[in-house]
Amino acid sequence: MKRRKVLTKSEYSNFINAHNNRTNVYTTVYDFEEFNESAAVDSSVVLNRIFLDFDAHGEKLEEAYRDVQIIMNMVKDEDLMHTLFFSGRGFHLFIEGERTYDIRNIQAYFKVVKQYLENNGGGSSLDDRVGQATRLRRVPNTVNMASDDGQGNALYCIPLFYEDVITMTLEDVLLLASKPRHIPFQKSGSKRLIFPEQPPIEMVEGEVSVPQHNGKLPILPCLHHATMVENPGHYSRVYLVQWYRDILTNCSGIHLRGEQAKPIIDRIMEEIRDVYSDSDEVWLDWNERESRKHVSYTVRNNRFSPSCRTLINNGYCVGKCWRFPNVNN
């Protein structure tokens, strides 16, 4: 997947027009305030919305439609500012909020949504990945190359409204998505969420853990969360490799040169493939040669993985874990 930093609306439109109907086209869920030469700076993310992904991958699209209908009733009742899209294989709902600087606040509201769904007979299609700064979303009115209308034709990501999901059947939505839906873009609702404020990490009871995965090396919950996305940010990948390097070298800080570095690089590449290659939803821009080049550079650069304090300050922390008592380590 080709990535490009665009700074103007015309650049954005030109990029979409050049790639639509040829490949999947994505953009970031969140805006950023700072950029380096090629990408956004993760720590400058503007966390001012929650992205809810009702994803069925075709088999259970009816369940995803049911779930989004349930949540849209809640959104309508509370007059929350939002936008809704059919993605081609599910539904994407964005609820706007006041800016927060703690990812945990967004994750806390996600639990409210999840509980509401379960209390109203739904919840099976809602993706648990939420609050990741580098999460991607499909660009409206672009084709979903992995979708199928049942007759071999791909479907488009199209905007929807409350009235649509309340009055339309799923078949109506699929028919509507057979082509782009060019209508004036607008956000519905008038109220922005105030995300529930979470206590400082030091005051949190219990520990967060890492979901089960195919890897063999331990990984911090924050790094797992930051990298289990469609297109992990640059620093998320660097921190991950630094973490694996520290584990494999017992944090010795030794300078790895030439052949000495090769087994470490090989093992890290193997671990990344094991953890991330079993899903078609994460690391969409994975390239073996490019990844090996960057892993090799990071391993030989001889820098320790970031401290908890650095991860907290840069917005990576998702809660207290086993490492937290050693905040500066």
Image (cartoon, rainbow, N blue to C red):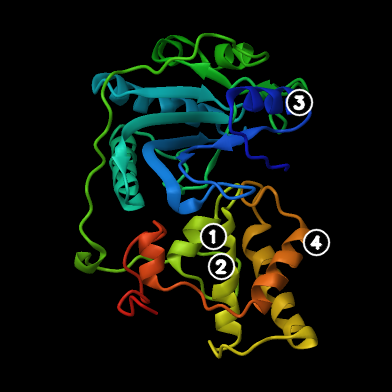
Comes first in the chain, label 3 or label 4: 3
Comes first in the chain, label 1 or label 4: 1
Instruction: Kindly identify which numbered label has been placed on residue 289.
Output: 4
Q: Is residue 100 left or right of residue 51?
A: left
Comes first in the chain, label 4 or label 2: 2
Q: Is residue 148 left or right of residue 139?
A: right
Q: Dot 1 lies on which element?
A: helix
Q: Amino acid at mark 4?
A: Arg
Residue drawn at (67%, 13%), measured in percent from left and top? 179
* Quadrant of the rendered image containing residue 61: top right
**Residue 293, image x and y in percent?**
75, 66
Q: Amino acid at mark 2?
A: Leu
Residue drawn at (33%, 80%), measured in percent from left and top? 326
Tell whether label 2 touches label 1 (CB within 8 Å): yes
Q: Dot 2 lies on which element?
A: helix
Disc 3: which residue = 18
Q: Is residue 247 left or right of residue 131?
A: right
**Residue 36, image x and y in percent?**
58, 50
Q: Dot 4 lies on which element?
A: helix
Comes first in the chain, label 3 or label 2: 3
Measure the alpha-carbon separation of dots 3 and 2: 33 Å
* Quadrant of the rendered image containing residue 273: bottom right
- The mark closer to the camera, 3 or 2, is 3
Disc 2: which residue = 240
Q: Is residue 154 left or right of residue 85?
A: right
Q: Amino acid at mark 3?
A: Ala
Disc 1: which residue = 236
